Amino acid sequence: MALTALCLPMLIVSMDVSVLFFAVPFIAADLNPSPAQQLWIFDVYGFVLAGLLLTMGSLADRFGHRRVLMWGAVGFSGASLLAAFSSTPEMLIIARAVLAVAGATLMPSTLALIRHVFDDDAARAKAVATWNAVLAGGVALGPIISGVLLEHFWWGSVFLINIPVMVALLIAAPLLLPGHTAVPGRRIDVLSALMAFGTILPVIYAIKEIAAAGWSPGRLAIGVVGVVLGVAFVRRQRRLGDPMLDLALLGERRFAASIWTNLICMFALLGNSIMVTQYLQSVLGFSPLRAALWSVVPSLFVAVAAPTAAVAAGRFGRPAVMVGGLVVAACGFALLAALIGQDSLLVVLVASTLLAGGIVATTSVIADHVVGIAPADRAGATSGLLETSSELGGALGIALLGSVLNAVYRVSYPAGVGPVEAGRSLAGASAVVHREPAEMAAQILDAARGAFVDGMAVVAWVGAGILGVTAVLIVWAARTPSVDRLPTVSEGVTDRVRSHLRAERDGDQ
C-alpha cells in the first residue's frame, strides 16, 4: 500500500509532461495565445521542473519527505484547478509553472521515501523498479488519456484528472508513510538554490531553442549564462560546511558513473521518441492519436523490463544488468539503423521495444543504486540530482540527435525538388506540398521521407555507439570496490574525498 501511495503521484507528474500533446490546438482555439505564449504553455512545465528538482530534494531532507510530499500534493491540486479553468494564456502559463513547482517536490520526495520505507535491499530494488516503470508509463499514457478526454470533454479535463489522485495521496500519506525523516538542523542555502535554478533553466532552455530554431548568439549566450552559474554553484558547494549538493557523492566512481549513465539513457530514449513520433506521423502518415496508440505498444513490453532487471541485479549484480541493458538498447538502435525504410512500422516497433526495454532496465537499477547508496539525511537531494540528470539528458537528446537528423536530411534531400523550404526539414516539406501540383507534391514527399529515413539511420548508429561507449564506462567503474552506503553529514564524509576537495578548494584561492 505504501508503494502504491508513492507511485500514483509519479504517474500523474510524468503524465503532465506529455498530456498537452493533443490539447494544444483546443487551447489555441479557446484562449488564442500568441505563438510565443503557446510554446511557453507547453514548455514551462519541463523547464521549471528541471530547475527545481535539486532544491526541492534538499527542502524535503530539511522538513521531512512526507511533509513536503503533502505540500506538493496540495499545490498540484490547486494548480490543476487553476489550469483547468484558465481564461487567459498568461493564467495557464502561471498554472503550468506552479504545477512544475509542486511536481518538483513530489519526484525526489517519493524516491527518498522508498529509501526509508524499504530497508531490505531486495524489497527496495523491486520498489524502485515499480516506481521507475510507473514514471516511464506515465509519459507514454499522457497523450492517450489526453486524446480520450478531448473526445468527450473540454481541454481543461486533462488537468482535472490530477485532483482525485492528489486527494487520495493526502489521505493515504499520514497513514502509510513515515514522518520522521526530517533533518531539523539542516539549513537551506538560498543562494545555492537560486544558482541551481539559474544553471538548469537557461541550459535546458538554450538547448531546446537551438534544437528548434538553430544556433544564434542570443541562444548561445543564454546557455553560457547557465554554464557560468553552474561553475559558481560548484565552487560554492565546495566552500559550504553543509552544501546543498555534497560533491563527495560524485567522488565515488560507481555513483558518478550511474548519474552519467542515467543522463545518457534519457538522452537516447527522448531523442529516439521524438524521432519515431515524427516518423509515424510524417512518414507513415498516421494521425496524432493513431501514432500515440502505436507508441504505447513498446511500453506494454517495457513494463516487464524494470521488475526483471531488479531480479537479475540480485543474481548477477547491478553492473552486469546495466551493461546488459545498454547492449540491448544499442541493439535496438542498430536494428533501426540497418532496416529502417519508408514503410517499416514493425521494424520501428521492435527497435523501440528493445531500446526502451534496455534503457528502463538500466535506469531502474541505477535508481536503486543511487537511492541505496545515498546518505539517509541526503536522500531527497540525491534523488533530485538523479532526476535532474534525466531532465538534462532528455533535453540534450532531443537537441543533439535532432540536429544530427536535420543535418543528414539537408544533405540527403535531392537538389532541385520543390521549393527550398522542402530541403530544410521534413516539417518544411509537409508545409509546402499543399500549394504544389499533385505530381510535384508527391515527388517532394517521397524525397523528404527518404531523406528523413536516411537521417534516422545515422542517428540510430550514433545512438548505438554512444550507448556502447557508456557500457564500457560501466565496466571500468565496476572495477572500483562497491560502497554500500555513503556516510551522512553527521558521520563525516570519507577523509580521502574530503581532503581531495579541500585541496582543490585551496588551489582555487
Image (cartoon, grey):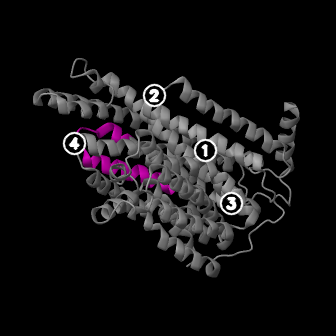
Marks 1 and 3 close (CB-CB < 8 Å) = no
> Mark 2 is on which residue type?
Gly
Residues 121 and 375: in front is 375
Q: Which residue is mark 3?
A: 380
Structural distance between the alpha carbons of marks 2 and 3: 36 Å
Image-based side of 144 in relation to 381, left or right: left
Q: Which residue is mark 1?
A: 260
Image-based side of 82 in relation to 430, left or right: right
Q: Is residue 263 magenta?
A: no
Q: Which residue is mark 2?
A: 214
Q: Does residue 384 sit above or below 470 in this rendering?
A: below
Q: Does residue 248 sit above or below 507 in this rendering?
A: below
Q: Could you tell me which quadrant the C terminus lies in?
A: top right
Q: Which residue is mark 4?
A: 343
Front disc: 2 or 4 = 2
The mark that comes first in sequence, 4 or 3, is 4
> Judging from the image, what secondary structure is the residue with disc 3 in?
helix
> Mark 1 is on which residue type?
Trp
